Image (spheres, helix red, strand yellow):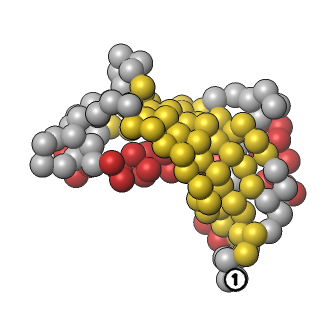
Amino acid sequence: MVNSEFSWPVRVYYEDTDAGGIVYNANYLKFLERARTEWLRQLGVEQDHLLQLDVAFVVRHIDIEFRNAARFNQLLTVSCRVTQLKRASMVFTQEIVDEHDRIIVSAEVTIACVRVSVMKPIAIPEDVSGVIARATS
């Protein structure tokens, strides 16, 4: 699957850091999530609309490598690209890099589509999977 990469800027705020001024590890997950959400938004897919339909994208699995530390007030770029689009899931390759293109975090994130009321996998709605397929081909 040939696909385009999406990037989203993130500034490290004081609240993102630990006592040493280094980004707390769990906050990198938030940065990755923001980029995926903004990617969907750019495609015209609003997750609040999906929730009204009892549909959500949830993280099923993450492989993450913490390669360098980010610090307070740094401007980071978070990228994401879909490497697999399946019937009820998709896999993203994501990176967070600093202003010097130094890789801070790399991750592979598997996202599942679920019916929220029962938290069971369902097929990605056709209109959404169509938009994603066009954006990643």
Total numbered badges shown on the rendered structure: 1
Residue at 33% over, 48% down = 25
Residue 120 place in picture, x, y as percent: 73, 75
Q: 38 or 29, which is in the foreground?
A: 29
Q: Sort mark 1 into few (<14), some (14-19) or many (20+) by Cα contacts within 10 Å.
A: few
| Name of the residue lying farthest toward the top | 100
Q: Is residue 38 visible?
A: no
Pointer 1: what residue? 118
Task: Please identify the quarter of the rendering in which residue 71 is found.
Answer: top left
Residue at 69% over, 60% down = 112
Quadrant location, the N terminus: top right
Q: Is residue 116 visible?
A: yes
Q: 124 or 63, which is in the foreground?
A: 63
| Name of the residue lying farthest toward the left | 19
Q: What type is the residue that disc 1 sits on?
A: Val
Residue at 79% over, 45% down = 85
Residue at 41% over, 18% down = 101
Residue 2 place in picture, x, y as percent: 79, 27
Q: Is residue 99 above or below residue 1?
A: above
Residue 36 place in picture, x, y as percent: 57, 46
Quadrant location, the C terminus: top right
Q: Check disc 1 and report its element: helix, strand or loop.
A: loop
Q: Is residue 120 above or below residue 90?
A: below
Residue 20 place in picture, x, y as percent: 13, 42
Looking at the image, residue 118 sits to the left or right of residue 94; the answer is: right
